């Protein structure tokens, strides 16, 4: 803005300036300004300058800025010509940057000179940089606070609300401007919230967590944190809130999704059971699933397969799966149990014979199983029982694919894939000279181990459920297992594997007298495993889950206590639990009925 002064005063001032004399007070006044200052007339002659102008530009009264500071004069001249207009510009002098502001001096509407005020811009730039830095920090804090999914309230030391973030607005269904500036005690009195963590923090001066209910019925977990100044005065309370109403809703949704997933898993298991029903295979344990994957994969090639595993594990079913997943599935799968055929006949059964080959032979001769399986698969079960002479002929067939009937001189070629199985240790038999090493390696191109039932703990429950339902449907009987009976069946090691499990399930369905199959209905050889399992029987417990082992040990301890103490009160005292716990566990394991006790239910 133009600087207006009285004409007479200005003339006197100009007159004195012409004499290059300014009174001490006026000079001290401009020297105290803290910025560079000088005044010039319309001719460019300096009439007043302070110490900073003198030190920075060498300016003093009487200096002609047209000569001393031509750049400054050109800018000042533009101002003088425009009249009543002020301007700012930067100028460099002796490697320093200055910010200069020029204002015209107007006397009675006549412009008589100009005032130049300047400051070194280095300080301004530093301040600007600091301001920019602080603005960035504030912006980041704003973004963090506003993007938080948890509610955030900031109150002063008197519980007055200073700030709340958008998450808090959403949780409380209220606008921030409706809350900011109000006191927390007032909000509690109005019923907006049932209690305030801020008020609690102010009382105890430490971190406090509470459970709070909002006016909208939301359930919130609030944590208040005090903030102190260097003198220990409480200046802020920062409260964070988490809406556990939403968390509980999500938990319920997760539980529903888990139930749906379990239902889908059960449905998939049912589909798997339906798919494998003809093969009578149920696989849930990783080891059995691996066996099935290997069987399906090896089905696509013609390599010989040696199936290893205990009796009753289902090696024959795996052989069926291999065949049905091969390009030979339209051709026959012929199965021979080498241990069920007399040694004298095994060779003729395998390779066939011509008429008159031996006493009792058919007059027309007979093709062997290898010929009958031409184009398909021959499954040699119990291959370890194959006599040595037959082992030689089988080895020759595996080498060249040709067979010769007994009593015949010519050979013929057949296209047969060989699958073999045994429960015996062939390597041990090789060491004893009972099995040929070269045949062993011919058969063991692809070995597949079929796990025992005790190694398939995850399969036992679906196997039991499947065969209970299967034999129930077959016989028109609907049966269910009690928990105690099911636990006993799950703990049993099944030395006879799947074959024994099937037989037990069929017996339980047919022989149990009620719709519920209980411990009393179980075969006597299963009961000892319920009650008499020694604690150090680690080999027997191998493959059991932790829960199954714990249930077995718990059942044994209860059984022993029943035999020694005979009543629940004594058992509870001996085992260090209350009587209701003993009653519940006796009922869980079915031991009350087993030993003639009827444990009372918990009240």
Image: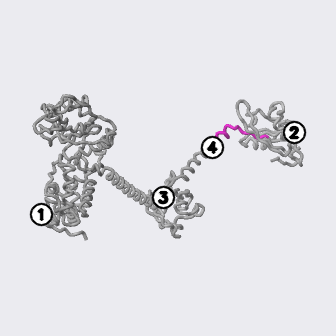
- Please tell me the numbered disc located at residue 565: 1
CA–CA distance in space, label 3 to label 4: 32 Å
Magenta segment boundaries in residue numbering? 116-131
Residue 308 is at least partly visible in this image: yes
Q: Which of the 4 quarters of the picture holds residue 416? A: top left
Which is in the foreground here, disc 3 or disc 1? 1
Residue lying at 59% horizontally and 48% vertically, measured from the top left: 139
Residue 101 percent coordinates (x, y): 77, 41
In terms of sequence position, does the residue under pointer 2 or pointer 3 come before the other? 2
First reached walking from the N terminus: tag 3 or tag 4: 4
Of 324 and 179, which appears nearest the observer?
Answer: 324
Mark 2 and 1 residues: CB-CB less than 8 Å, in contact? no
Image position, residue 120 (x, y; %): 70, 37
The residue where tag 3 is placed is: 241
* Distance between the alpha carbons at the discs numbered 2 and 1: 123 Å
Q: Is residue 313 magenta?
A: no
The extreme front residue here reads 363
What residue sits right under mark 4 in the picture? Answer: 132
Mark 2 to mark 4 CA distance (whole Å): 40 Å
Residue 436 placement, left or right of 474: left
Residue 512 lies in quadrant? bottom left
Dot label at residue 42: 2
On screen, residue 128 versus residue 16, left or right, reads: left
Q: Is residue 488 above or below residue 3?
A: below
């Amino acid at each position: 803005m133009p600087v207006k002064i009285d004409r007479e005063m200005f003339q006197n001032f100009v007159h004195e300036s012409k004499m290059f004399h300014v009174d001490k007070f006026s000079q001290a006044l401009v020297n105290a300004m803290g910025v560079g200052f000088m005044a010039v007339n319309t001719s460019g002659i300096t009439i007043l300058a302070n110490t900073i102008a003198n030190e920075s530009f060498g300016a003093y009264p009487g200096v002609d800025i047209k000569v001393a500071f031509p750049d400054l004069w050109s800018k000042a001249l533009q101002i003088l010509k425009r009249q009543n207009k002020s301007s700012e510009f930067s100028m460099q002098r002796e490697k320093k940057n200055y910010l200069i502001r020029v204002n015209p001096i107007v006397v009675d509407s006549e412009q008589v000179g100009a005032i130049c005020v300047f400051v070194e811009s280095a300080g301004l730039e530093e301040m600007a940089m600091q301001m920019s830095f602080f603005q960035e920090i504030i912006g980041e804090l704003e973004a963090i606070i506003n993007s938080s999914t948890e509610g955030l309230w900031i109150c002063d030391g008197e519980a007055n609300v200073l700030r709340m973030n958008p998450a808090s607005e959403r949780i409380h269904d209220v606008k921030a401007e409706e809350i900011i500036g109000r006191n927390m005690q007032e909000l509690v009195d109005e019923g907006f919230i049932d209690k305030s963590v801020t008020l609690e923090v102010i009382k105890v001066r430490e971190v406090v967590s509470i459970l709070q209910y909002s006016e909208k019925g939301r359930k919130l977990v609030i944590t208040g944190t005090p903030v102190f100044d260097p003198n220990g005065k409480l200046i802020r309370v920062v409260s964070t809130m988490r809406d556990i109403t939403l968390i509980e809703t999500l938990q319920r949704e997760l539980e529903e999704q888990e139930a749906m997933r379990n239902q889908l898993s059960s449905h998939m298991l049912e589909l798997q059971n339906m798919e494998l029903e003809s093969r009578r295979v149920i696989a849930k344990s990783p080891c059995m699933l691996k066996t099935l994957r290997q069987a399906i994969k090896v089905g696509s090639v013609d390599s010989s397969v040696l199936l290893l595993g205990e009796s009753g594990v289902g090696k024959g079913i795996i052989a069926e799966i291999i065949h049905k997943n091969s390009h030979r599935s339209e051709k026959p799968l012929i199965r021979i149990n080498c241990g069920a055929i007399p040694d004298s006949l095994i060779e003729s059964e395998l390779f066939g014979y011509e008429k008159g080959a031996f006493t009792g032979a058919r007059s027309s001769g007979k093709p062997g199983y290898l010929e009958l399986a031409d184009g398909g698969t021959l499954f040699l079960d119990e291959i370890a029982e194959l006599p040595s002479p037959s082992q030689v002929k089988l080895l020759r067939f595996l080498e060249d694919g040709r067979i010769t009937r007994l009593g015949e001189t010519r050979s013929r070629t057949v296209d047969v894939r060989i699958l073999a199985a045994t429960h015996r240790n062939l390597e041990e038999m090789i060491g004893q000279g009972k099995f040929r090493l070269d045949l062993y390696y011919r058969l063991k191109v692809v070995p597949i181990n079929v796990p025992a039932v005790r190694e398939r703990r995850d399969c036992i429950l679906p196997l039991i459920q499947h065969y209970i339902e299967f034999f129930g449907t077959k016989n028109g009987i609907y049966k269910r297992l009690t928990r105690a009976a099911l636990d006993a069946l799950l703990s049993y090691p099944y030395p006879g594997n799947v074959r024994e499990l099937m037989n037990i399930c069929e017996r339980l369905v047919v022989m149990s007298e009620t719709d519920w199959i209980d411990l009393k209905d179980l075969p006597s050889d299963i009961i000892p495993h319920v009650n008499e399992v020694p604690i150090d029987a680690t080999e027997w417990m191998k493959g059991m889950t932790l829960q199954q082992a714990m249930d077995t040990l718990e059942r044994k301890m209860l059984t022993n206590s029943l035999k020694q103490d005979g009543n629940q009160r004594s058992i509870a005292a001996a085992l260090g639990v209350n009587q209701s716990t003993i009653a519940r566990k006796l009922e869980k394991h079915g031991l009350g009925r087993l030993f003639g006790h009827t444990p009372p239910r918990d009240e």
